[in-house]
Image (cartoon, grey):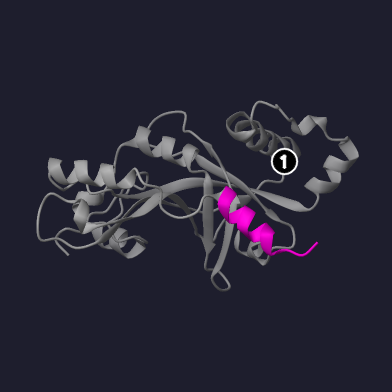
Amino acid sequence: MAERRHFLLGLPGLTAAAEAASDSLYIPDRHVERDRELLMGFFEEYSFAMVITASGGIRVTNVPTIYERPGGGESWGKVWWHLAKNNPQNDAMNGEAEALAVFHGPHAYISPSWYAARPTVPTWNFAVVHCHGKPRRVDDDAAFARSLDQLVTRNEKKYGAGKAWELGSMHPEYLKGMRQQIVAYEMTVDKVEAKFKLGQERTAGDRVGVLRGLERPQGRSIFELTRDYYARLKG
């Protein structure tokens, strides 16, 4: 395990043994990413995260998130999300139990035929970041409303095709009813583990081949998946 590295920021004073015990992700040296600005941008760009808890049994919910950057220092800031009120995972988010938010970037199959070097084998390239923390329920109504407004505003600006839909355009009573069906959370990020396995350790010739190979799309887009799934529906 000589190549094992621990990417631990924000928890000074822990021993190496304690760090190793709390790691959730295997990361060889060559795939560790430490650039804070890069990683904070990653949280914002790939904001649909998988939230995992283990208190009372393993639970996983996939959620859109809002990343709140830190004001300064070595802090990693906060992640906000909400769950349906009836989701059993709410019981595990009490401000004391640990949780893991997994942010996945793009991923793809890499063919050996793309490399300049021989011999070699196939692999899969990807980027992923694990955020550790203890999510707590947001009971302050103003903070709750603010988090929802930020979630809608950011995504409308990025994906809404310029139609500028606003949360405030909904009737207040309807909006109140909808908010009563969800629970908001914030999680201070105590620890980050970042793995960027993109072939960066390979030769310049191999990297050129990887980029050429990746120009061809792999798999269906969400549009194609949705279209094909709709085609199966009756009525």
Query: Is residue 75 in view?
Result: no
| Most foreground residue, 184 or 72 | 184
Q: Can you give x and y, in whole percent of width and height, for residue 153 in the image?
A: 65, 31
Instruction: Using the rendered view, name the quadrant where residue 19 is placed.
Output: bottom left
Residue drawn at the location 29% of the way across and 41% of the way down = 34
Q: Is residue 173 left or right of residue 36?
A: right
**Residue identifier under label 1:** 140
Residue 61 percent location from the top left of the image: 59, 60
Specify whether 200 is left or right of 154: left
Q: Which residues are magenta?
A: 223-235
Would you say the magenta stretch is mainly helix, strand or loop? helix
Q: Is residue 156 above or below residue 13?
A: above
As shown in the figure, which amino acid type bears the numbered disc 1? Asp
Q: Quadrant of the C terminus?
A: bottom right
Q: Is residue 178 left or right of residue 15?
A: right
Residue 69 sits above or below residue 197 on the image: above
